[in-house]
């Protein structure tokens, strides 16, 4: 791609995002299922519907460009999805699992915020104003999701900490009895 221009880079980045969003469509139901907090589960389900809309926006952009969205796998998102799957496989319980899921989800959101910020800038530079508008809409939704996750973390993290402290105290009492 060394001799290619900004438009080719833009299309390549869009293909990467298309792959990323499609990977999320498959991963979000698993995160929702693993959540114990109803609010967190609902948030994942809501973001799943939003993500399907992101895929549709990207398809609209590819149609306008006369390009196919297929042909590239987003390795960054694949790694983030794999990390999320590892979190689900941990034997965390309740609020501790929810805190871990929020961390995994926020890493995904930050990745997407960076990627959408980049393609928005490319679209604007290329004079693709309608595409820039669609991409900015998605970028704002990703930022809103990150903010919602932060608010949930402010509720869930203290619960996870309290539960962890109670488990630690219980373990210390048991070890004293044995000694």
Image (spheres, rainbow, N blue to C red):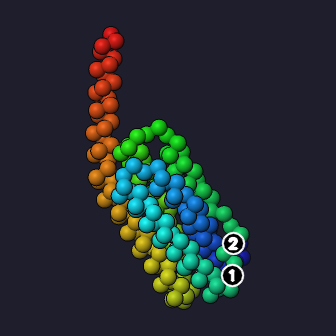
- As helix, strand or loop, the secondary structure at mark 2 comes to loop
Tell me if residue 137 can be seen: yes
Q: Which residue carries the number 1 mark?
A: 67
The image quadrant where one finds the C terminus is top left
Q: Is residue 70 left or right of residue 83?
A: right
Taking the spot 48% from the left edge, 69% from the top edge, the residue there is 49
Label 1: state its secondary structure: loop
**Residue at the spot of label 2:** 70
* Percent x, y of residue 100: 42, 47
**Which residue appears at 55% of the width and 57% of the height?**
27
Q: Residue at x 59, y 83 (%)?
A: 60
Q: Is residue 125 visible?
A: no
Quadrant in which residue 80 is drawn: bottom right
Q: Quadrant of residue 55?
A: bottom right
Q: Residue 90 appears at what percent x and percent y? A: 49, 40
Residue sitting at 55 percent across and 88 percent down? 128
- The single residue placed furthest to the top in the displayed view is 179
Q: Nearer the viewer, residue 122 or 133?
A: 133
- Mark 1 surroundings: few (<14), some (14-19) or many (≥20) residues within 10 A: few
Image vertical order of residue 100 relative to residue 114, above or below: above
Residue 168 in picture, x, y percent from top left: 32, 29
């Amino acid at each position: 791609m060394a001799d290619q221009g900004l438009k080719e880079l833009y299309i390549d980045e869009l293909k990467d995002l298309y792959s990323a969003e499609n990977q999320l469509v498959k991963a979000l139901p698993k995160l929702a299922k693993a959540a114990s907090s109803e609010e967190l589960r609902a948030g994942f389900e809501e973001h799943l519907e939003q993500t399907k809309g992101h895929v549709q926006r990207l398809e609209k952009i590819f149609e306008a460009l006369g390009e196919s969205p297929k042909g590239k796998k987003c390795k960054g998102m694949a790694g983030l999805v794999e990390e999320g799957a590892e979190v689900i496989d941990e034997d965390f319980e309740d609020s501790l699992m929810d805190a871990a899921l929020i961390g995994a989800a926020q890493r995904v959101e930050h990745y997407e915020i960076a990627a959408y910020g980049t393609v928005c800038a490319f679209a604007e530079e290329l004079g693709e104003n309608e595409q820039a508008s669609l991409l900015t809409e998605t970028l704002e939704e990703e930022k809103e999701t990150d903010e919602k996750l932060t608010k949930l973390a402010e509720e869930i993290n203290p619960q996870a900490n309290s539960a962890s402290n109670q488990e630690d105290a219980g373990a210390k009492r048991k070890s004293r009895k044995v000694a």
